[in-house]
């Protein structure tokens, strides 16, 4: 098995990166990760609570969205007390002309949300204990 296909290895990598820098960068999807895009009555409290924990640990949070109305996204996040540092933009300490934002982890309903959620939640518990 490839090294980072083992969830324990990617989990340990996140912890090592946090220990080295006192922070990590987490990008999170907007639609159907923190916002009920399809209006099906879904709630995302666990992911939102995780984002709040990460922010309390000095993590940089990027909302990574395909929504064209960035003002709507910003207002929704603010009104619902969902922490974010930028929307679709790299952190100021990472310059790049690539369209892909730099991140140590991506929370996305279509890309392994369960695994990444568990890894980041473990990180918050591990860091909080120390």
Image: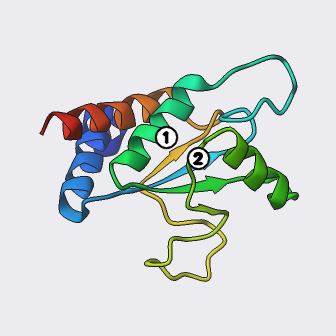
Residue 3, how many percent across, how many down? 28, 44
Q: Residue 51 carries which label?
A: 1
For the residue labelled by badge 2, is the local secondary structure a helix, a strand or a loop?
A: strand
Q: Horizontal and vertical percent for residue 120? A: 38, 37
- Image point 77% across, 51% down: which residue? 75
Instruction: Give the residue at the far top of this rendering.
Output: 41
Horizontally, is 95 left or right of 97 in the view?
Answer: left
| Residue 93 figure quarter | bottom left
Residue 107 lies left or right of residue 1; in this view the side is: right
Residue found 61% across the figure and 66% down from its top: 100
Residue under circle 2? 28
Residue 65, image x, y percentages:
73, 53
Apparent side of residue 77 relative to residue 71 in the rendered image (left or right): left
Q: Using the image, determine if residue 129 lies above or below residue 54.
A: above
Q: Residue at x 46, y 34 (%)?
A: 50
Residue 113 appears in view: no
- Pointer 2: residues within 10 angstroms few (<14), some, or many (20+)? many
């Amino acid at each position: 098995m490839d090294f980072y296909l083992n969830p324990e290895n990617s989990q340990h990598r996140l912890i090592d990166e946090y220990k080295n820098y006192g922070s990590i960068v987490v990008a999170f999807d907007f639609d159907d990760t923190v916002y009920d895009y399809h209006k099906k009555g879904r709630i995302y409290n666990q992911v939102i609570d995780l984002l709040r924990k990460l922010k309390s640990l000095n993590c940089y949070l990027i909302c990574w969205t395909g929504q064209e109305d960035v003002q709507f996204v910003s207002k929704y996040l603010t009104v619902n007390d969902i922490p974010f540092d930028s929307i679709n933009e790299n952190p100021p300490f990472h310059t790049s002309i690539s369209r892909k934002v730099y991140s140590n982890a991506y929370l996305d309903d279509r890309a392994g949300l369960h695994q990444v959620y568990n890894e980041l939640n473990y990180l918050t518990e591990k860091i909080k204990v120390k």
